[in-house]
Image (tube, coloured by chain):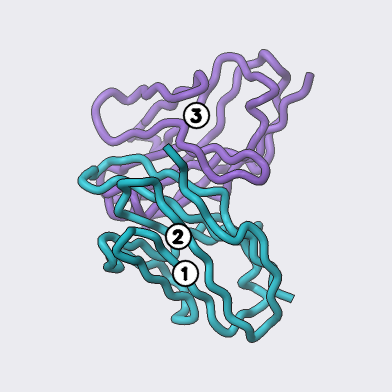
Chain colours: A purple, B cyan
Amino acid sequence: AQSVTQPDIHITVSEGASLELRCNYSYGATPYLFWYVQSPGQGLQLLLKYFSGDTLVQGIKGFEAEFKRSQSSFNLRKPSVHWSDAAEYFCAVDRNQAGTALIFGKGTTLSVSS
Amino acid sequence: KAGVTQTPRYLIKTRGQQVTLSCSPISGHRSVSWYQQTPGQGLQFLFEYFSETQRNKGNFPGRFSGRQFSNSRSEMNVSTLELGDSALYLCASRSSGQVTGELFFGEGSRLTVL
């Protein structure tokens, strides 16, 4: 069965420092992968997605993610974190390859210190 | 363009009651999905509707049901509420015809069961 693991429950990063959030997935075929962000009291916003092709994908707000098939990973990165990036981040894999039935990881809460 | 609208935003029910939540997708979007978000289980897929037909379903008991109307608006219903049904219920819509399209989420309906 498909699953998504986000090993880090909570991460604190200093403002201006780089960020990497880890995501590992379990899926038999080529996965469709997503990163979403959720601010308190808000719904989820798509940061970026990977379906095929270039393994380094660019998203909104300066985020990028790299798909590594050999490691079953899809880690999210940002070179310089801003205080407004504090939120909860979710990695997801598409259950039916139509982008509608997503299996989410448990999320990583990002805190940004000044 | 208005986003995904969910009503009510907050509600409190007691065990044994039933509840109906409403979701209005982005104009032109014909696919509506529902997710349950809890601290313990995270985000879990409930079901997806497209053109008034349920085409995907998650692993939830029959107490959870939904429907979609001809204008693409969707409702979900939970009968015989249990304490464990307390959660944030998120609705997401996607435009039809896109296999790899983005899911747009509403801000959710927060249900508390006492």
Question: Considering the numbered disc 1 on the image, is that residue within a helix, a strand or a loop?
Answer: strand
Task: Please identify the quadrant where the N terminus of chain B is shown.
Answer: top left
- Do the residues bearing badges 2 and 3 touch, measured as CB atoms within 8 Å? no
> Which residue is the site of mark 3?
A76
> Which residue is the site of mark 2?
B34
Question: Considering the numbered disc 2 on the image, is that residue within a helix, a strand or a loop?
Answer: strand
The residue marked by circle 1 belongs to what chain? Answer: B
Residue A91 seen by the camera: yes
Amino acid of disc 3? Leu
Question: Considering the numbered disc 3 on the image, is that residue within a helix, a strand or a loop?
Answer: strand
**Figure check: B46 above or below A72:** below
The residue marked by circle 2 belongs to what chain? Answer: B
Q: Is residue B102 left or right of residue B7?
A: left
**Figure check: B69 above or below B6:** below
Q: Residues within 10 Å of mark 2 (few under 14, many from 20)?
A: many
Point 55% across, 37% down: residue = A37
- Do the residues bearing badges 3 and 1 touch, measured as CB atoms within 8 Å? no
**Pointers 1 and 2 within a single chain:** yes
The residue marked by circle 3 belongs to what chain? Answer: A
- Do the residues bearing badges 1 and 2 touch, measured as CB atoms within 8 Å? yes
What is the spatial separation of the Cα atoms under label 2 and label 3, in whole angstroms?
Answer: 25 Å
Residue B67 position, x and y percent, is 37, 70
Q: Is residue A52 left or right of residue B83?
A: left
User: How many marks can you see?
Assistant: 3
Amino acid of disc 1? Met
